[in-house]
Image: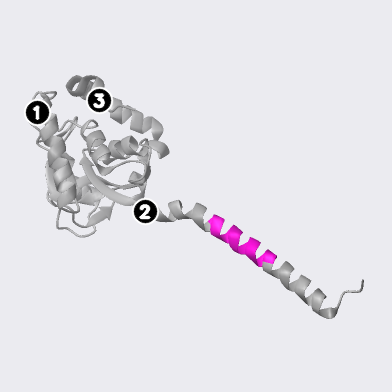
Amino acid sequence: MRRTQATYIALIAGTAAAAAGFVWSAMAEQSAGEAPAEASRLETAVFAGGCFWCTEADFDKVEGVVSTISGYTGGDLEEPTYKQVTGGDTGHYEAVKISYDPAKVSYEELVDYYFRTIDPTDPAGQFCDKGSSYRTAIFVDDAEERETVEESIETIETSGVLPNRVVTKVIDASEFWPAESYHQNYYRTNPIRYKFYREGCGRDDRLKKIWGDKAAIN
């Protein structure tokens, strides 16, 4: 039987429609697979825990933390230098800005981890580093973050795990100034010097003494 021109047109149209349907189906499946990645947005947290080399090294090991930047915050001086900040007249703290995936680690978990990497009972600084720039503080973006931190402090003090009260300050976030490039990822770029400094400063020994098996030591 000979097929008419109309039959051929119908066959071609049907084939085209099926192909289009396949393409749209594939695109829909791809979009569905990409949705979670698009929905996952990074958030930031800023912690001052004494020497920012150590704070950066500690948080880089946390699952869900995407990046860390050492820097200065809390003071009024714009574009401060390391020398100016450690001089003690700028009001700035050595701090670390952390970018994290809230789908993998919560702000509350980061706060809990932070406290176990520091001595929150020392008002003069941290470990072998003393001075205003080495004091501990958490810089919060909003009332919700402040509440989370204050509840964490209350839990710590109620537990009685520490010998003295928590003196870590909770401060409204302000301009964060990245530190000089040689400070970034110092524990990776200068591993021998970093290890010598950390051990010599007695950071981990002090953490074990005050936190016991709850100390966050990597």
| Mark found first going from the N terminus, 2 or 3 | 2
| The N terminus - image quarter | bottom right
Instruction: Rate crowding at label 1 as few (under 14), some (14 to 19) or many (20 or more) other CA atoms within 10 Å.
Output: few
Eye-nearest disc, 2 or 3: 2
Query: Which residue is under mark 2?
Result: 41
Q: Main secondary structure of the magenta part?
A: helix
**Residue 176 drawn above or below residue 2:** above
* Percent x, y of residue 154: 10, 34
Q: Which residues are magenta?
A: 18-30
Foreground of the two, 87 or 90: 90
Q: Is disc 2 placed on a helix, strand or loop?
A: loop
Name the residue rendered at 26%, 55% in the picture.
177
Instruction: Rate crowding at label 3 as few (under 14), some (14 to 19) or many (20 or more) other CA atoms within 10 Å.
Output: many
Name the residue rendered at 13%, 39% in the picture.
151
- Residue 158 disc label: 1
* Percent x, y of residue 153: 13, 36
Q: Residue furthest front?
A: 1
Report the Cα–Cα distance between label 2 and label 3. 30 Å
Report the Cα–Cα distance between label 2 and label 1. 34 Å
Q: Is disc 1 placed on a helix, strand or loop?
A: helix
- Residue 173 can be seen, yes or no: yes
Query: Which residue is under mark 3?
Result: 215
Magenta includes 25? yes
**Residue 113 drawn above or below residue 1:** above
| Mark found first going from the N terminus, 1 or 3 | 1
| The C terminus - image quarter | top left
* Percent x, y of residue 124: 10, 35
